[in-house]
Structure formats: structure tokens, C-alpha cells
Amino acid sequence: MTSPFTAAPAAAERMTLRPGVIAAALCLCVYGALALTVDFPRAALGFQSDEATYYMMGHSLAEDGDLAYRYQDLIRVWREFPTGPAGVFLKKGQTIGGAPDPDPNRLFFGKSFIYPAFAAPFVKLFGTNGFLVLHAVLLALVVLCGYLFLHARAPAAPSLVLATGFVGATVVPVYFVWITPELFNFSLGAVAYFCWLYKEVASPERSPRGTAWLFCGRSDLAAAAILGLLTFSKPSNALLFPPIVIWQLLGRRRPRIAIASAALFVLVAAGLFGINTAVSGSWNYQGGGDRQTYYYEFPFQNQAPRTEIGVPKSRDEALTQIIFNPRVFTTNLLHNVAYVFVGRNAGLVAYFFPAVFALGAFLAAPRRRPFWQWLVLASGLAQIALFIVVTPYTWNGGGGSVGNRYFMSAYGVFLFLLPPIASLGVSLVPWIAGSIFVAPLVLNPFAASFYPGNNAKSGPLRLLPVELTLIYDLPINNEASRVRQWYGDTPGQGDPGFQIYFMDDNSYGREADKSFWTRGEARAEFLIKTDRPMKRAEFTLTAGPLPTDVKISVDGRGQRVHVNADHSQQLTFALGPGFLYQGMWPVWRVSVTSSAGFTPVFHGSDDTRYLGVRVKPVLVP
């Protein structure tokens, strides 16, 4: 039986460039047209995540030729965004010797300038939409590079399907509409590894014209320089570089190229940090005790002292006492290893399925994989390991992220784990499986980005587990009415208070007696979080004018009960230790399912909600 992972015959004819060029051109046309025509400020609904900082940096470089934050930069934002630069990161400047900045009328941006520097020429030509034009160019380039790499060992058709699916059947197109470095970092990682590895799978006599430089040391130097840029964009990306030197030393036995690559990598990365020092007086754009973020009022907007309107956001110290808490370090690590692959809000299976497919294809015959592919695997997994160890409570990139924002840099290298795939049917798997999860997000990226909590409220994503290690940084935290809702603490009863985090829209707001209604014929999921261990959870269930069958599950243990019309029933659960968030707060997973529903408007009320069962939760310490 022929394996689907089969290389093209050794004597195959010259590689066909045309399908890859057409696919890249289509990608550029589609996303380029969107970039040029969309009314970005209106479609984006405002700034999210770190967008305000990169927006201001790109415009400052394009229009002022500098990286300083001044009064005019602030005025410029309000021309397009009535909220102002909400979330902008700023810090005071200083001289290289450490003295205060002699110019009191400026501050500096607390983010890397490499992404806005690349975007600035496009912003100069196309305004704010220039950021998206850059993204369109980068996406087209990744598609072309992916096609060339895959086609070097396999037929054109499956290579084209895999290359386009690697971009399109993931959350990557959602970040096309983000003015942040995620798509930029993804593209640089993919292009750098293409420059390094194309020569390992292709031959000069079969390759298209214009690719001769990819078969000599210049391609390794290009990869090193690109990874230097990527490291300045996000220092953790330095982990992507060592495999290149290791391969040059152990695989190719070219110590001179290894030394030159390492020197160029250090020169580019250190040179950019040096430029940052020359601009602001500090090499660390995220450090300094004066680095702050601003949400409502901004420096130079009025006469308020800066220290009263900003929130300190310096990143000079690691929170080792929290990260390496011996009580929960192992528990967090084991949970995160699972969550990073199958998590509902940030798992690779849901948001980066082609990476999981590539990993599975690689492991299907590990002994047949070349040494350089093992190095690729090590670099990709090292990025994952770094974040789940060092940032165990924020490894997804924060509450506003769609999928795993921090994985975007490493995602590009997973393309190079793919073995030769000759079967067109197999090459369609990433498209089909990936689209099941991300199609609604890709087709409406602005809504998916501005309302990230909605993405996992329905559909197949609900089959995956909620990442309990990310409670404070789940996308649902963007909806204040759904999280940290206070229940219990009933006057005169002495029961403890606790918080509920509602994971979907299948439950309604808190009633006066600290109960809530679920949606009829639906499963409502929520988390209960307390400040101490609890012995029992008691749920009083009340039906409306129609009877209903109710199922309650607490940490996987379920009970069922029939509740007659206008009657109540009580279910009690013995509580285990729960998941100990940050080593301090127990958390339990709960779901309530009602088999029936009714709308009060048909029973003499003006309430138009579709109600299932009323739930009053009480905890017993």
C-alpha cells in the first residue's frame, strides 16, 4: 500500500512555479483589496490589545520621522478614533548616561519599533490602511515560500493545498486586521526558515529561476538576519535561531558559515537594541519603572500629572514567587501541556490545526525524518515550553487574544515539519479540520477580534476544555457582565460569597435573590471561584410554568433530576479540592442543562427571554 507521505520521484521534471505565484497573487489581491478599501477605524470598533502603541509608532515614523510621543501625535489619533489611544504604552526618556530626558514635552513608546518601521512606508502611502497592506504582502509571501518548499518534494497540487491551508485554515487571517506584530512575526519566522531549509529539500536543476542564491551561504545569512529582526520584535524568538547554527556545525560541517550566521544574528539584534538605546536612552523598550499604560486620559492631553492617569506596566522583574510556586508549579505545567494543544480558547487543535497536522505527519515515521527536521521540532516546542513555564497564567497572550497570540511567531516554523505528501486527499485534511473551528472567525475577523469572548460560546469549540490556568486572561474577561459575578453571601444566613464566570450566553444575569436563569433547551457552563476550600455545593432548581429535566455536572460528576412546573428541587455535590488557581483560589467547573424552556411573555409577563430553569447556588465551607 502506498503511503500518503511520499516524495516526488528523484528524476522529476522542473518544479512548477506558476501555481504558487497564482495563489500568492490571489492572496495579495483579496487581502490587498480589503486592506485598501475597508474603513478600518469604523470596522475595527476601536483599539484592542496593544494596537494603540503600534498605531502611534507607525504614524509617528511615517509622518514625523521619529519615535517620540508628543502632543501632535495625540491629536492625530482622534482624527480616526474617538476613544483616543486607549491602552498605549509610554515611558520617559533619558540620556545614554542615565540623566532625565532634557525635553519635557515628549515621551517614548514602550514597544519594539521594528514592526511599525516596516509598516511606515505603507502608512505613508495609504494611511492607517497601510498596516493592512503590509500584512497582505506578507501573507502572499508566506504562501509562495510554503508552496516552493513543499513542492520541492511533492507534486504541485497537494503542495499548493497544504501551503494555502497553512495560512487560511487557521486564526492567522484574523490577525490580518490587527495593528500588532503577530502576523509580522509569523511571516518572518516562516520566511527565515524557508531561506535556511529550502536547499535541504530542493535541487538547483529542478528549482525555478531566481532561486540560485538559496543554495549557498547567503540564504543562511538571510535567515540569521531575519531572525535578528524577529528577536528584537520579541526576545523570546531568539530560540528559533540556535537550530540553524547547530545544523551548520553538525549537519553540514560548515563552521565558517555558522560563525558568520551567529555574528550577523547578534549584530542585527544587538544593533536594533542599540538604536532603541540611542532613541530613548534605554535598551529595554518594555522596562523602566516609569513605563505605564493609559486608558482614559493621556499625557499632554491636559494638565493632570502623568503618574495619576497611567497604570504602571514595567517588565523588569519575573514574578518567580508566583510562577514557580511549588504547590502548583507541576499542576499548572501538566494542565498547560494539555491546554496548549486542546484548550477551548487557545488550543492548537482549534486555532492552528495545520501545526498539529504537521506534527502528526512528522511523528508518523520519526526514524525517517532528517536531523534538520528534529531541530525544527525542537525550536517550535521550545517556544511553547517557554511560555507555559514562564507565563503559566498568560501564555495565550492576554484576555483579548483570539487563539494563542504568543504562538504566532513559532507557528511559521511548523510548516517545515511536513514530510512529502503526494495525496491530494490527505493535503485537504488541514483545510477541512481547521475550517470547522475557525471558519466563523476568518469570515468575520473584525467581530472575532473585538468580541473575542464570543468565539468559543458555540459550535465545536465547546467540545474542548476551558483553560483553568487562564481564568483572568480568558477572552470572556472582556465582558464584565459575565465574569466575577458575586453569588452567595446571603444576608442573615452566613453562607460564604463566591465568584461565577459564565462561559457562554446560555445563562442570564443575576436575579435579586442571587439566583440566575439558564436558557431553555441549552447547556450553560460556568466556573465557581472562591478564596478557600469548600465542602459542598447546593443548587436549588426552580422550574417555570413547564416541567423540565435538569442535569448538573460539577468537575465531571453529574446528577439528574425532574423538576415539576412551578416547583423546586435541590441537588448537593461534595466538592473536591478543585483547581487551585495561582496556588490560592479553588475553581470548579459546572454545567447546567435544561431539557425544556418557556418564554414568560406568553404567561402574563413582559419578559421575552427563553428560560429553562432557575438556579440558586450556595456553597458550604
Image (cartoon, grey):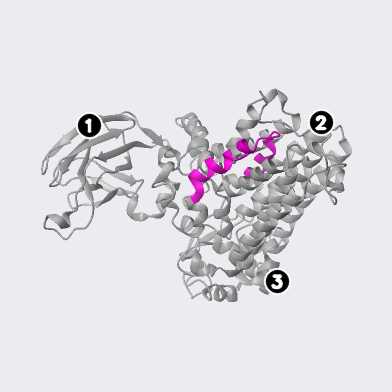
Horizontal and vertical percent for residue 108?
62, 65
x 68%, y 68%: residue: 61
From the viewer's perspective, is residue 77 above or below residue 391? below
Q: Which mark is residue 560?
A: 1
x 76%, y 34%: residue: 8
Q: Mark 1: which amino acid? A: Arg
- Give the Cα separation between the discs numbered 1 and 3: 67 Å
Do we see residue 40 in this rendering? yes
Horizontal and vertical percent for residue 41?
52, 69
Q: Quick one: label 1 or label 2, which is nearer the N terminus? A: 2
> What is the magenta segment's predominant secondary structure?
helix
Q: Left or right of 495: which side holds 307?
A: right
Which mark's residue is nearer the viewer, 2 or 3? 2
The answer to the question of whether label 2 and label 3 lie on touching residues, with beta carbons closer than 8 A, is no
Q: Which residue is mark 3?
A: 65
Q: Mark 3: which amino acid? A: Gly
Indicate the secondary structure of the residue bearing disc 1.
strand
Q: Which mark is residue 251?
A: 2
Magenta residues, as a range?
411-439
